[in-house]
Amino acid sequence: MVVAAVLTGCGGPPQATAPTGGGPLTATNCGIEVAVPGPPQRIYAAFQPAIEMVHALGVGDRVVGTAFLDAQVLPEYAGAQAATDYLPELPSREALLATNPDFVVSGYNGLFAESGTETIGTRASLRELGVQSWVFGPLCPSADGLSDEAIDPAAVSMENVYTDVRELGRLFGVQERADALVVEMQARIAAVQQRVAGAPPVRVAVVAPQDDGTFRVAGGRDFATRILEIAGAENVFADLTTRRNVPVGAEEIIARDPEVILTSTCCDGAYTVADAGPDVERIRTHPALAGVTAVREGRVHGFLFADRAAGVRVPRAAEMVADLVHPDRR
């Protein structure tokens, strides 16, 4: 049912191979060849970016299961999502296979690993069972089974987001819809970039307060860095590239002195930005952060982890960030 895949390094956007003579559709994703005999009919989507992607492409009627939302899906997909089977946590390998999928789309790379309580095995192990898979391109690991520490920083790009849309659209048999979605995303992003053009970039930190008084911030490998750039801002932690979410102490935030702080509120499928309120207050009232410019000037804003994702949310996220960091250019 599925041809063998060849694993190589992750170097740039995946390249498509057009089908010939009625043969299978093929594409390369994160160095792995993905081949299907025809558009998949039993799709499993894990994590917010993948769930919203399948709905944006209009293949919700082929979705046999969804898992792990960080927040509410975008309003335009709420009806389609309500019609799917949903797990608030990641499925076990057994639970996933019980849905008899022929294709698994993952919005993050951590789903596929050699072992762990929240993994379903490597992509190679699924392929052996006839199940093809896709990891969103901006999170390509350097090898099957690796996670954030193996992301190629060069892969964290909007071009890879567009490639995901186009290639999944082609594999799913909805190429025209995918092409139209890319055009819409590009237009909205261009409008944001035009709106903030010429404005000095605002120094921003994306911060998740932890229960022990420390913080996790979005580092340079996280797609938040690209979203901030689109919106006329810069990630003050962009130089931290060991992982996407980097633990830091208050002293590090003080030293970087961001002009704006965005929260990274997560993870519940019912969350909206209103649920970021407690995180905003924890940052605003943290004694050590009182002198940080963002706190002193009242520029700590609620933001969702879901809006940091490399997927169809990017234009919406960039519009929101631009409103927050350049309010004079709304």
Image: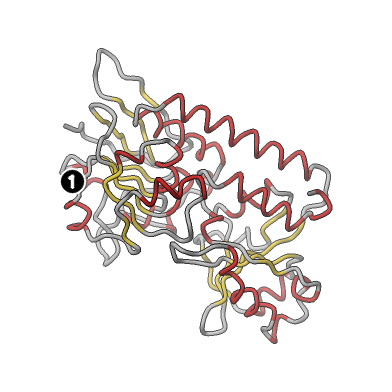
Residue at the image point whose x is 22% and y is 54% from the top? 96
Q: Is residue 224 above or below residue 6?
A: below
Q: Amino acid at mark 1?
A: Asn
Quickly name the residue at label 1: 100
Of residue 119 and residue 316, the one placed in the foreground of this image is: 316
Residue at the image point whose x is 27% and y is 65% from the top? 116
Of residue 24 and residue 12, the one placed in the foreground of this image is: 24
Q: Is residue 212 above or below residue 27?
A: below
For the view shown, which residue lies furthest in the bottom direction?
A: 287
**Crowd band around label 1 with a 10 angstrom C-alpha radius: few (<14), some (14–19), many (20+):** some
Residue 300 percent across, percent down from the top left: 70, 69
Q: Is residue 262 left or right of residue 154?
A: right
Q: Is residue 263 above or below residue 328?
A: below
Could you say which quadrant of the image residue 124 lies in?
top left
Secondary structure beneath label 1 = loop
Residue 197 percent across, percent down from the top left: 79, 42
